[in-house]
Image: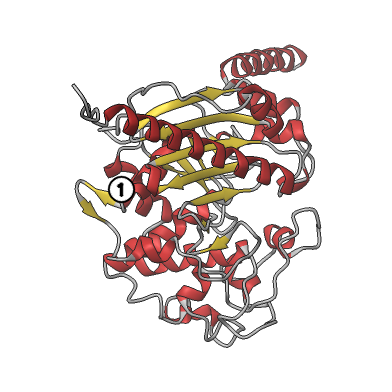
Amino acid sequence: MKKWLLAALVILAGSGTWYWQTIDRDVRSLILTFPTDKDLLFWSDEQRDFAFRALDKMPLLAKSRVMSASEQPLQLPAGQPLEMPLDVDAYMSTQRAAGMVIVHNGEIRFEDYRRNFTADGRWTSFSVAKSLTSTLVGAAIKDGYINSVDDKITTYLPGLEGSVYNDVTVEELLTMTSGVRWNEDYGDPNSDVAKFNNHVPEPGVDTTISYMRSLEREAPAGEKWVYKTGETNLIGLLVNRATGKTLADYLSEKIWQPYGMEADASWLLSSSGQEISGCCIQATVRDFARVGLFMLSEGKVNGESILPEGWLADATTNHVGNISPNYGYGYQWWTLDNGAFMARGIFGQGIFIDPARQLVIASNGNWAVASDRQRMEERLQFYQLIQQEIDKEIDKEMVESAPEAPALFE
């Protein structure tokens, strides 16, 4: 008996060694620093640094659905290297950025990776996913699954009937103006955004509906903007119920496959098996840049828009007044007064899109603070510097291409 037990232990040890040597490097790093707190908001910098690139590789942490790479990837040719108007090393270091891609006129003008991250690695997006979720609402309207943004959300989510969401419209969810009270403080373990992650639903009730229908009203619907991740999760559930498709499948069908994303991506699932639509798409930086190009193309795939006429203009227009001196809010897109807009996620994730300059900047990172105001302002200043550099190039080209003035005297 002792000999058999010893042999079994030797086999297990050997198998463990083999497994350890074959698993992904990022997974090994995460295992070595494995968090004890199940809420990612309260992990250490080191734990997040490994987790952000490996969340979808460890089902023990979170399950996910895959959006497969396109068979015909959209090519991103290398363009003339952009003259960077600042110390890039210092900027990337301050932002704790792992990757950044700048695309101008469809060409990559700048690309850089740090923190042992690479071009083929996936990094979680956090609330960048919100902007894609809202875009799927537009696709569902174009496809006839949803009638209008003026519909009551209870039309698609009857589990909310009789709750504070009884008369809230799809558009009020999209613009986060439901008037429902919500606390999005990422540093507060008693905030709604923290408690929502650990909520145990009533038997037979979806987790999102179970938590959200327990909330209270603080203002009439349509009158007050408050940032609420829980409401984007409702939007995703609404799309799922209306289309009868998972969000990952619908995103694959409408954008990921036909537009030409280069690599597989994934979408993390909640405890009830639904995509966490307010968060957590894992993709390469280049493919997040392609999301920006999709928006610049006015949502066109193979020459035809997958979105209703006027959708993108509505989605990227400020519907809520100035949230701060710099930002407004559309359909889950942050808007700027100069016509640019962005998808933005905690800890430093972002896609900046400037239609006037045909400019996209996709970047990721691991800020020390989830919602770091100073890092946000530094990043906005960086975007503005890149815009100015593009303008200088345009001005120079105009001067160089102008015809010579005729001589007044021979």
Neighbourhood count class around disc 1 (C-alpha, 10 Å): few under 14, some 14–19, many 20 upward = some
Residue 278 vs residue 341, the one in the foreground: 341
Where is residue 216 shown, x and y percent of the image?
A: 69, 81
Where is residue 38 shown, x and y percent of the image?
A: 74, 46
* In this rendering, position of residue 325 left or right of residue 263: right
| 92 to 235, vertically: above or below | above
Amino acid at pointer 1: Ser
* In this rendering, position of residue 56 left or right of residue 198: left
| 150 to 176, vertically: above or below | below
Q: Which residue is mark 1?
A: 297
Number of callouts: 1
Where is residue 102 shown, x and y percent of the image?
A: 46, 32
Q: Is residue 386 visible?
A: yes
Where is residue 8 shown, x and y percent of the image?
A: 68, 17
Q: Give the quarter of the figure containing the C terminus.
A: top left
| 135 to 111, vertically: above or below | below
Q: Residue drawn 64% across and 28% down?
A: 92
The image quarter containing residue 61 is: top right
Residue 143 vs residue 349, the one in the foreground: 349
| Dot 1: element | loop
Q: Residue drawn 77% across and 15% down?
A: 2
The image quarter containing residue 87 is: top right
Q: Is residue 60 visible?
A: no
| 332 to 354, vertically: above or below | below
Q: Give the quarter of the figure containing the N terminus.
A: top right
Residue projecting furthest to the front: 409
Q: Residue drawn 69% across and 64% down?
A: 200
